[in-house]
């Protein structure tokens, strides 16, 4: 039973970590390697507003979300727009921005394990004899809600449909008057917002540390590669595959193999099906 | 005439006022190079403690070298050796930079990671630099190598603890004590996947197994683990009464939060548990770290009355930095500067061979007890009584305070069990 419960929690955690990354890539084909840094930045901004400025949790959280969304949009407007379409340059530039943010935070004093956010709800509950804390249950609930919200946004709102149009066929979307750069800014802001939401939900479980930025990036990349770059359904399915594989590894092989699971999943996917479970961009090459 | 006289009186009084310190400050400073991993607790607390000691010594006139009083100058360099993925060679380059570019007369502090400290031994010996290790490196191999190749490594000392004594002299007796008091005898070992922690987990399991304790589980977590639920579920299932922890990663705070949320009926007995050492741990875990036990290696890193100097040091640190000494590496780094001062003054010179002899014969009642070095291994002589040697400290978080629970000679309280845990029968 504990495998099922903690497998679901772990999968929801991975899905939350990866959603923003897959959203940006899915819409604007932009590999945002600053994703992990934005995650940590959101947590740190919220911590500063909460503990240094003394704002209420809700206000601090909302301001942190808004700030990170603006940072994401600005990253595209000022830097990434200049190298748009050059994948390698996009990876290098976004990773460099991420490095600058993370190491800048470390330089500015984000050291040690004392930077933490309070849990939304305290306490725990026994589910079929397995003790689970409320914050972890919230991870599953809020993770599901976030997926639902993003799905609704992309499929039911004007901006979302424009983003979807860009993802499907950029040229056709351009002919219909959809501004490619504006949509990329919107997707970066939305992706960064997703990273920030994930941070505010997940960081109360641990501490705000610079290393979390690198960890989140690796997990997001693993989930997206296994699921198929840019595919939402694939990302969620991959989060469950990797999430359960990790828990099973901990139980049957040992916790120290846990970290290898995501990396092995990347290698296996790249060998067997380079476009991932639901990816489409390489299907032709694969067939050939 | 009156104006000239007044000027002369003022000038002379000013001179008389600043001369004692001014004399030392005008002399060439003695440069202390400190290679530390400053992004981590064991680095930044050591840096702060050394700065405090240097300031105090300089304010008192400096170090007497022969007939001359000379000030100390601290040069800190970030070795980054506690950061994941940073190669040992980077730490060696940092040490070399301190010697060749900063012209350090002495090296105090790190390298902090055992692997880097061991690798730096040959380099320090090549340059005949006296080095006093104060933080991070706990490996017994360090002082064993000094004893084995004394002529080569005689310049190397360690003023902080090492893992064999910590295990046999502190942790195992403390475990047996809590076992006897509350009738506990089953252990679940949870350690980080790094050399020292794996070794410590293995040895403690072996020793406690021989003493008749049940080892109900042993989990090794990779560095950076953020979810410990499965191991905690297992510990609960296997009815572990004590969880022995050995981790220096900040994420170990997550384990303790999960332990609290899941109400695991087992006492978290940290050996080296960096996350729990800092005074900020209580606030960071929102009080969920209550009942956690951890070692800070040397006394003085948590307030107690080990010697008359202990609380003086604690208060001076609090005054300067606004918080209590933070953990392992603080009192030992502070003490190393004073030990060096004592040795230089007795040697009357900065000549490394003379200072080595002076350090070998040091006998100083310091912050964490009597400071003496074993003349063969150059390891500080440990003890459980501060009158006999350097004492360690294990503490437990109780109501927001770090209460010293081991050794009994300096304890300020006794171990408490969490309310959801019952004593054994």
Image (spheres, helix red, strand yellow):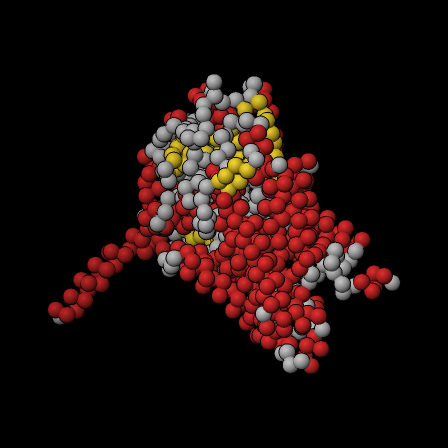
Q: Which residue is farthest left?
A: B2
Q: Residue at x 29, y 52 (%)?
A: B20
Quadrant in the rendering for residue B128? top right
Q: Which residue is farthest front?
A: A156
Res B115 seen here:
no
Say which of A152 and B116 sits in front: A152
Marks counted in the figure total: 0
Residue B203 vertical placement versus A254 (above, below): above
Describe residue B405's horizontal placement relative to residue A190 as left or right.
left
Say which of B224 and B350 sits in front: B224
Quadrant in the rendering for residue B5? bottom left
Tell me the quarter of the image containing the N terminus of chain B: bottom left
Res B53 seen here:
yes
Q: Point out residue B271 in the picture as x, y percentages from the top left corner.
A: 51, 34
Q: Point out residue B386 in the picture as x, y percentages from the top left corner.
A: 39, 29
Q: Point out residue B276 in the picture as x, y percentages from the top left corner.
A: 46, 41
Say which of B87 and A217 sits in front: A217
Say which of A46 and B19 sits in front: A46
Q: Point out residue B15 in the picture as x, y percentages from the top left corner.
A: 25, 59
Q: Which residue is drawn at 38% across and 59% down?
A: A55
Q: Residue at x 33, y 38 (%)?
A: B311
């Amino acid at each position: 039973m504990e495998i099922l419960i903690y497998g679901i929690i772990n999968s929801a955690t991975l899905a939350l970590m990866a959603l923003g990354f897959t959203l940006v890539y899915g819409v604007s084909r932009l590999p945002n390697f600053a994703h992990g840094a934005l995650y940590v930045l959101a947590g740190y901004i919220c911590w500063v507003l909460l503990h240094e400025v003394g704002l209420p949790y809700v206000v601090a959280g909302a301001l942190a979300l808004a700030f990170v969304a603006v940072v994401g949009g600005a990253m595209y407007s000022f830097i990434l727009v200049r190298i748009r379409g050059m994948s390698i340059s996009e990876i290098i530039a976004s990773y460099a921005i991420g490095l600058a943010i993370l190491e800048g935070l470390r330089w500015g004093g984000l050291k040690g394990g004392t930077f933490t956010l309070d849990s939304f709800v305290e306490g725990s509950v026994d589910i079929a004899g397995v003790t689970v804390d409320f914050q972890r249950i919230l991870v599953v609930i809020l993770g599901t809600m976030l997926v639902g919200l993003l799905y609704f946004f992309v499929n039911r709102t004007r901006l979302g449909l424009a983003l979807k149009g860009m993802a499907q066929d950029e040229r056709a979307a351009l002919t219909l008057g959809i501004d490619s750069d504006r949509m990329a800014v919107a997707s970066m802001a939305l992706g960064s917002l997703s990273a920030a939401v994930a941070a505010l939900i997940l960081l109360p479980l641990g501490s705000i540390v610079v290393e979390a930025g690198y960890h989140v990036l690796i997990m997001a990349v693993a989930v997206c590669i296994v699921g198929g770059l840019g595919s939402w359904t694939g990302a969620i399915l991959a989060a469950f595959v990797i999430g359960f594989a990790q828990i099973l590894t901990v139980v049957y092989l040992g916790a120290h193999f846990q970290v290898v699971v995501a990396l092995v999943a990347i290698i296996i996917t790249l060998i067997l099906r380079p476009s991932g479970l639901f990816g489409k961009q390489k299907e032709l090459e694969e067939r050939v | 005439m009156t104006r000239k006289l007044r000027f002369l009186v003022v000038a002379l009084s000013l001179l008389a006022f600043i001369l004692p310190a001014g004399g030392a400050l005008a002399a060439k400073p003695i440069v202390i190079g400190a290679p530390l991993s400053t992004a981590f607790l064991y680095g930044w607390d050591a840096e702060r403690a050394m700065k405090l000691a240097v300031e105090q010594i300089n304010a008192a006139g400096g170090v007497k070298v022969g007939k001359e009083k000379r000030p100390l100058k601290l040069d800190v360099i970030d070795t980054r050796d506690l950061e994941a993925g940073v190669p040992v060679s980077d730490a060696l380059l940092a040490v070399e930079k301190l010697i060749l570019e900063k012209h350090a007369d002495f090296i105090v502090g790190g390298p902090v990671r055992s692997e880097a400290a061991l690798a730096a031994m040959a380099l320090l010996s090549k340059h005949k630099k006296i080095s006093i290790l104060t933080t991070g490196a706990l490996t017994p191999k360090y002082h064993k190598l000094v004893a084995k190749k004394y002529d080569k490594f005689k310049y190397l000392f360690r003023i902080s603890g090492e893992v064999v004594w910590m295990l046999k002299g502190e942790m195992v007796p403390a475990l047996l004590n809590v076992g006897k008091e509350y009738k506990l005898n089953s252990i679940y070992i949870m350690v980080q996947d790094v050399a020292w922690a794996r070794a410590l987990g293995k040895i403690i399991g072996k020793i406690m197994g021989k003493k008749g304790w049940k080892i109900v589980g042993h989990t090794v977590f990779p560095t950076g683990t953020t979810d410990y639920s499965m191991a905690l579920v297992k510990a609960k299932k296997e009815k572990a009464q004590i969880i022995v922890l050995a981790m220096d990663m900040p994420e170990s705070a997550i384990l303790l939060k999960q332990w609290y949320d899941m109400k695991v009926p087992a006492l978290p007995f940290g050996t080296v548990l960096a996350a729990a050492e800092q005074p900020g741990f209580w606030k960071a875990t929102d009080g969920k770290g209550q009942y956690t036990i951890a070692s800070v290696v040397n006394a003085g890193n948590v307030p107690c009355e080990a010697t008359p100097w202990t609380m003086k040091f604690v208060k001076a640190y609090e005054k300067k930095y606004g918080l209590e000494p933070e953990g392992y590496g603080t009192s030992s780094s502070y003490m190393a500067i004073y030990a060096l001062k004592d040795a230089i003054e007795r040697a009357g010179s900065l000549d490394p061979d003379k200072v080595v002899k002076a350090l070998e014969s040091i006998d100083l009642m310091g912050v964490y007890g009597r400071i003496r070095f074993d003349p063969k291994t150059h390891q500080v002589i440990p003890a459980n009584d501060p009158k006999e040697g350097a004492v360690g400290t294990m503490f437990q978080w109780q109501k927001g305070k770090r209460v010293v629970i081991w050794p009994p000679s300096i304890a300020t309280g006794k171990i408490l069990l969490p309310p959801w845990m019952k004593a054994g029968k």
